[in-house]
Image (cartoon, helix red, strand yellow):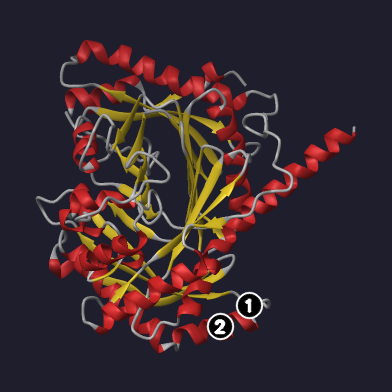
Amino acid sequence: MDSQALPAKPSLGEVTDIIVAQKRGNCVPVFVELPADLLTPVMAYLRMAKDSKYSFILESVIAGENVGRWSFIGADPFKVLRTGPGQEVEGDPMTALQKELSLYKYVKIPEIPTFTGGAIGYVSFDCVHHFEPKTKPVGFELADPLGIPESIFMFCDTIIVFDHLYQSVKAVSHVFAPSTSNATDIPFIYSTAVSKARRVAKLLLVTIAPNVFQTPQPQILDPPRSAVSNVGEEGYKKFVTKLKEHIVAGDIIQAVPSQRLKKETTLHPFNAYRQLRQVNPSPYMFYLDCGDVQIVGASPETLCKIEHNKVYNHAIAGTVKRGKDAEAEDEALGNQLLNSEKDRAEHIMLVDLARNDVNRVCEPHSVKVDELMKLEKFSHVIHMTSQVSGQLREGKTRFDAFRSIFPAGTVSGAPKIKAIELISELERERRGVYAGAAGRFDFADDEMDVCIAIRTMTFKDGAVYFQAGGGIVFDSDEQEEYTETLNKLQANVKAIEMAEKHHLAIQKSQTRH
């Protein structure tokens, strides 16, 4: 199939009418459609990202078993924004992000009722120091073992959109006519956007099979290295004991300490993602190749989703390991979780905190708990979950909503600011991406979707880092809390081990031949 023959929609006349005659905005998506039956998101990503330093894939599986409607893939961003000490922007990343995206007055079209471009990336947990300066440690500096930017955003205007409901694939670009443009510029801008969409379509239509390893898989370490904790079992239990003392003293109601595992590996990060999407399908699955660092995630939890200025926040608190019997044992364990006084109390606290966070930026009468203490099954665990929503107040933006909700109470504690201060005193390290956020801020100013960066791995300099924590309340048991962090880490650790084993077997087979 010739990509140049693919018809582009909307037409030049329609786009000109939207921008010039109707003056509805200055940014309109244009697309070409491809047959989807022989194309998978992984294959599309490998073809699109082959020669790019920066790229991403965003996918979704709902309730652990139903494929989400949309997958998004992009590469070669037109701009990369890094923030943090020594970066081009220091301080609040939302200020810089808002400034960049304010240039676009996006016009939605019915043919693609979803994300078509914008900023994709992560915001580290440590950015809370800019949103809530009181949380910044006093008298000591947090160690920075990973040394990554506080946030990275890739600005992409040409992406692939998979619609799994209608089995279609669209290569999308944008007609962006800034204020300096006039009507005579539109045909050239339109033609350039269509060419970009067709160029991406051409990459996907090539009949040669992609290199399934993205880049040649380096030799797997043999034997594979073990993961090492930054605090160890005794260190984590001491965190729990100390926080319980603060709860008794009335300083906090609960807090969420964490431990980080580091594992040396030569596994290509995208091969880890491919394994993870099989081992732990989740509502937010993402692979962000940010150049010097790669983020691989399968998060179950929405931090802040905004659709048509309606804000959604998802609270997960209460976790139990899944049973061997998918039906009977799972049901018994789920009921045990629902009837646990400790887990119910912890969960209700965090739902209240989520309501407060949402209420700070939304119309008070619109704030609702849509779902309360619902059980959701994932590959290795069952979670107790709730959802809170509200309509964004006039004068407030999605960036205000993000600041208000970030970080989630489920990864910090309550009261949130005091809990963060106490966690910092115990952990003494920057958390990096863990417990921060990953996802997208659309060109459309009333849309965004970011998850809490849990069940997330960071690859950097020949090592992979995993991190997990748990909510500590008055009657928490040190051993049980430590075990809960291991249960949460299990899917990611298993994905790495399985991928290493697979590629090591290939490696040995090639050596024999």
Q: Quadrant of residue 474?
A: bottom left
Q: In the image, 295: left or right of 266? A: left
Label 2 Cα neighbours within 10 Å, binned few <14 / some 14-19 / many ≥20 = some
Indicate the secondary structure of the residue bearing disc 1.
loop
The residue that label 2 is drawn on is: 333
Q: Earlier in the sequence, mark 1 or mark 2?
A: 1
197 w.r.t. 227: above or below: above
Residue 160 seen in render:
no
Q: Position of residue 335 (x, y in %)?
A: 51, 86
- Marks 1,2: beta carbons within 8 A: yes
Q: Residue furthest right?
A: 513
User: How many marks can you see?
Assistant: 2
Quarter of the image where the N terminus is located: top right
Measure the alpha-carbon separation of dots 1 and 2: 7 Å
Under mark 2, the amino acid is Leu
Residue 235 seen in render:
yes
Q: Residue furthest left?
A: 395
Q: Quadrant of residue 353?
A: bottom left
Label 1 Cα neighbours within 10 Å, binned few <14 / some 14-19 / many ≥20 = some
Q: In the image, 9: left or right of 399? A: right
Q: Position of residue 447 (x, y in %)?
A: 29, 47
Indicate the secondary structure of the residue bearing disc 2.
helix
Q: Position of residue 396 (x, y in %)?
A: 13, 51
Under mark 1, the amino acid is Gly
469 w.r.t. 96: above or below: below
Residue drawn at point x = 35 percent, y = 51 percent = 430
The residue that label 1 is drawn on is: 323
